[in-house]
Amino acid sequence: MASVTLKNISKVFSDPQSKKDVTAVDNVNLEIKDGEFMVLVGPSGCGKTTTMRMVAGLEEISGGEVLIGDRVVNEVPPRDRDIAMVFQNYALYPHMSVYDNIAFGLRLRMLPSLPQQLLNMGETNRIKADIDKRVRNAAETVGITQFLDRKPKALSGGQRQRVALGRAIVRDAQVFLMDEPLSNLDAKLRVQTRAELIKLHRRLGVTTIYVTHDQVEAMTMGQRIAVMKDGVLQQCDTPLNVYHYPVNKFVAGFLGLPPMNFVENATVSAKGENVYVDTSAFSLRMSPTKAEKLREYVGKQVTLGMRPQSLQDKFLATPEEIENGTVVRMHVDVIEPLGAVTTLFLNAEGINMVAEVEAETPAKENGPLDMVLDGGAAYVFDATTDLTIV
Ligand SMILES: Nc1ncnc2c1ncn2[C@@H]1O[C@H](COP(=O)(O)OP(=O)(O)OP(=O)(O)O)[C@@H](O)[C@H]1O
Ligand SMILES: [Mg+2]
């Protein structure tokens, strides 16, 4: 196993038609530790696949260095980088059995590298036995032993996905690169395979870079997650740190379900001890710790951010929550009961907000509802830079 280090890596594509340069990856610095499971996440087109392809050696690097362990691999061809890949379109060989699909790469690697005529039968048989052992181990790991004789077309999508994974792990590589490997699976199978991959990583401990645009996958699988936007790395930290302490409005809005509510054109004001974020519909009293840091922004324009879980139905709130929060009367536009929780689409004098409350809410569609907004859980962003203030 090995660490993977990206030092100021960039990728510039030139568009042959417009002759304009497209910077797909912009000066990214990232260190994936030996044995770590790192998730690269971000919206479509943010440069995730391009980053992976540069690590794999499938894309020339425009600037910067990629290191695997201590070795700079910029000029090392893909097959010598000791990397195993699973991509979204994990084409299996349709005419080969599952067994042969998994063994194919190993045979290519181990058998022809020795001059055939110099090999005696004993040597060939020893290598074949070794390949057989590895294929069976890998099949066992991903749970496809009973399908080894089948052709891919006789497998379900999830089973094929596992064959592709088996083909990658059989390699005993130093690094696994996985680019949206679960995207072809249905929701249930995705959750199941996700858990299998986590278990696999715990067992094998292979350094893994995993690309997804699915935030739940990122949060649940990554030991750390790296959030990208427009080719630029925004933040890299543990999932909970990124969730609780997003560096900017983009990261704050990207992680969390339903997404964070943003109220633009708010201003900061102070009255005595208290600091408020004033919107066109309400003034949110901030908690003392947040107030402290916000004081220098008094009079300035900011964006307020509130996760749907920080808006509570007053009817369900504790006296303490009501005391510490700010009560705002809102209009209930739509109610979506999800069973365990209920999503409310609310409106306060033209400001739309989404709240996630307990299922016991007495809220009625098209009726008024008093909500308690938690000023201790609110976020405030600089209106010009979008950086998090508190
Ligand atoms: N060969 C290419 N030539 C020109 N531009 C390219 C090329 N490959 C990718 N791009 C551009 O680089 C940017 C990043 O693409 P990339 O495939 O890395 O995104 P991504 O984050 O993997 O997105 P997705 O989630 O949709 O897979 C995009 O704007 C894309 O259009
Ligand atoms: Mg991609």
Image (cartoon, helix red, strand yellow):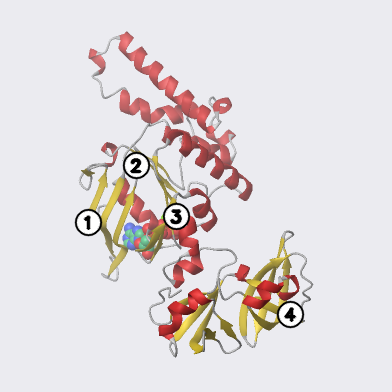
Q: Earlier in the sequence, mark 4 or mark 3?
A: 3
Q: Which residue is mark 2?
A: 34
Mark 4 element type: strand
Residue 332 percent coordinates (x, y)? 72, 79
Up/down of 236 relative to 136, above or below: below
Q: CA distance from mark 3 to mark 2?
A: 16 Å
Q: Which mark is residue 284?
A: none
Q: Which mark is residue 369?
A: 4
Q: Nearer the viewer, residue 316 or 203?
A: 316
Would residue 387 be visible to someone looking at this image?
yes
Residue type, mark 3 in image: Thr
- 3 or 1: mark nearer the eye: 3
Give the quadrant of residue 356: bottom right
> Could you tell me which residue is drawn at 39 percent across and 82 percent down?
384
> Could you tell me which residue is drawn at 65 percent across and 84 percent down?
348
Mark 3 element type: loop
Residue type, mark 1 in image: Gly
Q: Which residue is mark 1?
A: 64
Q: Which residue is mark 3?
A: 238
- Decide: marks 4, 1 in contact (CB < 8 A)? no
> Could you tell me which residue is drawn at 52 percent across and 27 percent down?
140
Task: Decide: few, some or many residues near mark 2? Use Cα within 10 Å; few <14, some 14-19, many ≥20.
Answer: some
Residue 322 percent coordinates (x, y)? 68, 76
Mark 2 element type: loop
- Decide: marks 4, 3 in contact (CB < 8 A)? no
Residue 306 percent coordinates (x, y)? 56, 73
Residue type, mark 4 in image: Leu
Up/down of 250 relative to 367, above or below: above
